[in-house]
Image (tube, grey):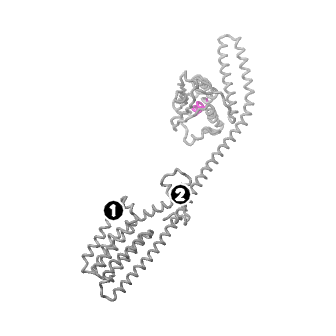
Amino acid sequence: MSLANLAELGVPLTTPSQDRSPSSGPAELLSRSDRFEREQEELNLRNARMGAWFVMILVPLCTFLDFMAYPERYWEFLVLRLACAASCVPLLLALNGTLGRKYCRAYPIILPLLPALMICFMIYLSGDSGSGYYAGLTLCIVATAFVFHWTFREIGITLGLVIVAYFAATLPNLIGTKDPRALGIFVNNTGFILINCVVLYIGSRQHHAIRQREFANRCKVEDQREELTAQNDELTATLKLLRETEAQLDQSEKLASIGRLSAGIVHEINNPLNYVKSAIFLLKKKGKIMPPEIAESVNRIAADIGEGIDRVAAIVSDLRTFAHPENRGARPLNLHEVSGKALRLLAKEVSDRGVTLVNEIPHNIIAQGDENYLIQILLNFVQNSLDALAGRPEPTIVIKAQHTETGVDLSVRDNGMGIPKENLSKIFDPFFTTKEVGQGMGLGLSICFRMIQQMDGEVKIDTEAGRHTQFTLSLKKPANT
């Protein structure tokens, strides 16, 4: 099949993958013409196997014809038939190797020519110029067109060689005969053979044209399928982007709502906090005139109250800035001291719930971060652990910190109920909570996640349902270490 044939049928000479990707693999870079030739090769190989078996089986089976037509030549003809069948064995074996694939276009010529030459030799040995064995030649060329009906070039060569062989076998007998009807019978037989050749050759060309059109239509369908696949992939990606954008818009709307809500909360809470701070200031001032043993206790209590009030103010301020994050200054922090401040605020709740809290953070481990952020993050992590430990035997919370290659990992681990897999992707979403109404707004971990991002940190979760949950906060090392 030529490139012009394919172009006339409207078949692109390169696959769509060639047009889109210059770096495509060799299989994708095959031109349409090369692909058609490959298909022709596979078809020839398959048909050659079938043709070889036809010759090997049918030629010896027809030996009874020799017994009926030329009994005196029966054994000679039998040897010829067996030799013809045996000659197909190496051809059949070669089909399974590289040699057969390399010369596959020769099989449509060789396979029908073998029985045709055998028949012509029989005609010559019979001495009969009007032998009815010309019908065997017709059978050979019909079978050739049937088995190899798309390889019209090879069929044309085969038909020509068969006619030449027929003339070579018959003319010597015709010249030496004295039968006046011999010439007429020869012309009659030759006419039948030639008419069969013309009909079969034209039919093979028509079959080849049909094959070309079928291939062209198949290529167009494949191109359309690839185009539809590409459009479907593009549509899928667009829908995914739309869903992500919708989720981001929904998140932004939630954050905007938090911003509006927090502005009013800060205004309403800061005023009573200022009154409490003033009262603490007066309490400290009164402590100066108290007996030393009382003053020391009062001052320590007042300091704890003041620190708690400062934490409340910082948390309210963080809620206000959640929707509009600001870059808080990070500095080197002693994680043992920071964790101590956070755990002191939860000491009573931990004791009331009967939970064992183990702080294994070394005294001298330093990380880069914001103190207020870290205190609030620890408060949320520990508070969530306390809630998860409700009703659990031997409830325990372990807080650790250790150096890594890139920074410091701070972890909070409990032996609580764990987090279900379906909730893992949502626990940092605003307003997501598994608690009952009135026990939480679902903002704690969402705010913590924003704080972690602002400190250029990362958070990982290791959980197993019914066994444990561990939050690991990865912080950076101070620049001077």
Placement of 12 over or under 341, stated as above or below: below
Helix, strand or loop for the magenta stretch, by majority = helix
Residue behind mark 2 = 15
Answer with the quarter of the image where residue 367 lies. Answer: top right
Mark sitting on residue 93: 1
Determine if the magenta segment contains residue 413. Answer: no
Residue at 55% across, 51% down: 21
Q: Position of residue 145 (x, y in %)?
A: 42, 72
Report x, y in % for residue 77. Answer: 27, 76
Q: Is residue 387 above or below residue 224?
A: above
Q: Quadrant of residue 255?
A: top right
Asked whether residue 381 is drawn in magenta, I would say yes
How far apart are the alpha carbons under marks 1 and 2? 35 Å
Q: Within 10 angstroms of label 2, few (less than 14), some, or many (20 or more) residues?
A: some
Residue at the bottom extreme of this rendering: 180
- What are the residue bounds of the magenta stretch? 379-387
Q: Secondary structure at mark 1?
A: helix
For the residues bearing labels 1 and 2, Cβ distance under 8 angstroms: no
Task: Determine if residue 439 is in view.
Answer: no
| Residue 288: quarter of image | top right
